[in-house]
Each structure stands twice: as structure tokens, then as C-alpha cells.
Amino acid sequence: MISSTRSTARRRSLAATGAAAALALTLAACGSSRDTSSMPGMHHGAESTVSPSPSTSQAMGDMPGMDHMATGNGLSDTQGGYRFTATDANLPSGRQVALRFTITGPDGKPVTDFTPEQTKRMHFYAIRSDLTGFQHIHPTMAADGTWRADLASLRPGTWRMFSSFTPGSGTGKGKGFVLSRTFTVPGQATKSPLPAPARSTQVDGYTVTVEGTPMAGMEHPLTVSLAKDGKPVTDLQPYLNSYAHLTAFHEGDTAFAHLHPTTKVTGDHGGPDLAFHAELPTSGNWRLFLQFRTGGTLHTAALTLRVG
């Protein structure tokens, strides 16, 4: 009887020890999962409660365009006390025009200190309401904080102009902002229908294919592949510290999204596959504009992507 009691107690002790070990392994796995998902640069504007490992930080630091991700859809001229101001509401059609504007800070004064993002202090985008006429410009700034964006000829209609920047000082230091305003180009405006969603398109003899199925509001990788004459392209040249620049605009409201490249640049032999970090906030159709350089020439490809 005593021997049976001791045997039973020992079995219970071993079972408890095993359960405790299993629980410890489970908690360790959960902690590891939290650490690997907290990658720097993936949620700018929010503070991480977990410090990533040095190896993770170094790996992400090697990725171009991942240091100052802008937040928001860019559909406001004001964010965090910063404002996009311009004196003109109308722009002429049929000819080049220099649009002058300023970015004012929370103190109401023009901002003159900006941190370069992908080698430029400011990225400026123009897009018509029907998602045609895309322009990506790097404006110049005068000493007083007045910017000048040299726009190519604009068709009549409503245009939205986006200013993407990162303040180099002040309350918004190190934070990415995208502000925009709408402008009217007088004349008879004819709306162009949005091309149907497609996985590939062609430009200047190149075939551009996009792989990935992004869901609204979720982080998702996209892969862009380039080919020419049926052969993979491997001679991409760096453009803005990456092998391609990818911008997206939402059908209907022209909401903005910058899809950040994660492929490391290693010289004038990029391609054929390029990786991007995508987080498109709204479902529906998005018009993607991919810019890449070969032989010193900049190419711009466009296609429609459906987001569920």
C-alpha cells in the first residue's frame, strides 16, 4: 500500500514537471514571435515596446526607403500642425507651369529644414482625378522656404498635388508626412476610364509583372518582375537609392500610398525581381506607377491592382 502511494506521487510530480517545461517553451516561443515581428521602420509614428535584435535592425537598415515611412492617405493639406499652402487654386492647361508653395510648421512659419528621403528633401506628385497624368517631381526650395515644382503640361480637370517630406527639426522631426491640395485646370475635362485590374503591363518594350494579393489595411509583400524580349532584366540602375520607385493612388478619392522597396542596391545590375513592402489602407482599385531606370533612361509603367 505504501509502495503504491509513493509510485502515484512520483508520477504526479513528473507530470507537473513536464507541464511546467511545456509552458516555459510556449512562453519562449511567444516572446520570440513578438521580437521578430517588431521590425524597425514598419510602423512609423508608433513606438515599439520590444527592442529588435541587432541582427534584425542591421538587416532592415540595409533596405532602402525603410527609415521614414509616411503615415496617412495624404488627402488633407494639414497634419500634425504642418500645412501645405499655395496661393493659386487654378493652374493653366496645355503648357508647363511652375507651382510655388510652402510647408508651414506648427509655429506657422515656413519649414526650411528637411531630411532627405530616398536622396531627396521632397517628393512631389501630381495626379488627375481619373488617375491619369501622373507626375513625380523633386522640387527646389528657396532660402525662405518657398518650393518650386516644375509641372509638365496639364490636361483640363481636377488635379491633386501631393507633397511628401520629413522635417529635419521641430516637433515633427524624423516623421514622414504626406500633404495634398486639389487644383483646377480650366477647360473641357474628359474623364478617362480606369484600365481593368491586371497583373502585367508593358512600357518601352519592357514587361512589368506584379505578384502578390494585398488585403486592405494589412502589411503584405509585393514582388515586381521585369523582362524584355522574353528575357529577365538584370541591368536596372539605381534610382532614388533603389532599383524602382512604386507609388499607388486609390480610385475615387485619389488616396496616396508609397510602396517601399526592400531590395538592396548593389550596383548597375538590378533585377529581375524586386521586393516591396505594401500596406494599402482601403479596398478597391489602386493605380500603381512603377519607375525604373535602364541605360540612363527613366521608364514609368502603370497598372491597376485590385485590393480586397
Image (spheres, grey):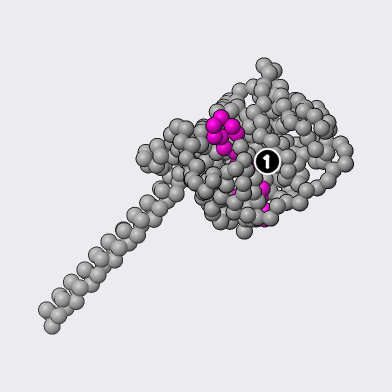
Q: Which residues are magenta?
A: 280-298
Q: Residue at x 47, y 32 (%)?
A: 268
* Total count of labels: 1
Residue ranking furthest to the bottom: 1
* Quarter of the picture holding the C terminus: bottom right
- Would you place residue 163 above or below residue 31 in this image? above
Residue 261: give x, y in percent of width and height: 52, 41
Task: Give 294 or 56, whichever is nearer the viewer.
Answer: 294
Residue ranking furthest to the front: 229
Q: Residue at x 65, y 37 (%)?
A: 178
Q: Residue at x 41, y 48 (%)?
A: 36
Q: Residue at x 40, y 48 (%)?
A: 35
Res. 129 visible in picture: yes
Magenta stretch contains residue 291: yes
In what element is the residue under mark 1? loop
Magenta stretch contains residue 190: no
- Would you place residue 55 above or below residue 30 in this image? above
Res. 257 visible in picture: no
> What residue sits right under mark 1 in the picture?
74
* Quarter of the picture holding the N terminus: bottom left
Magenta residues, dominant SS class: strand
> Left or right: 33 with respect to 15?
right
Residue 37: give x, y in percent of width and height: 44, 49
- In the image, what residue type sits under mark 1? Gly
Residue 248: give x, y in percent of width and height: 64, 45
Residue 87: give x, y in percent of width and height: 80, 27
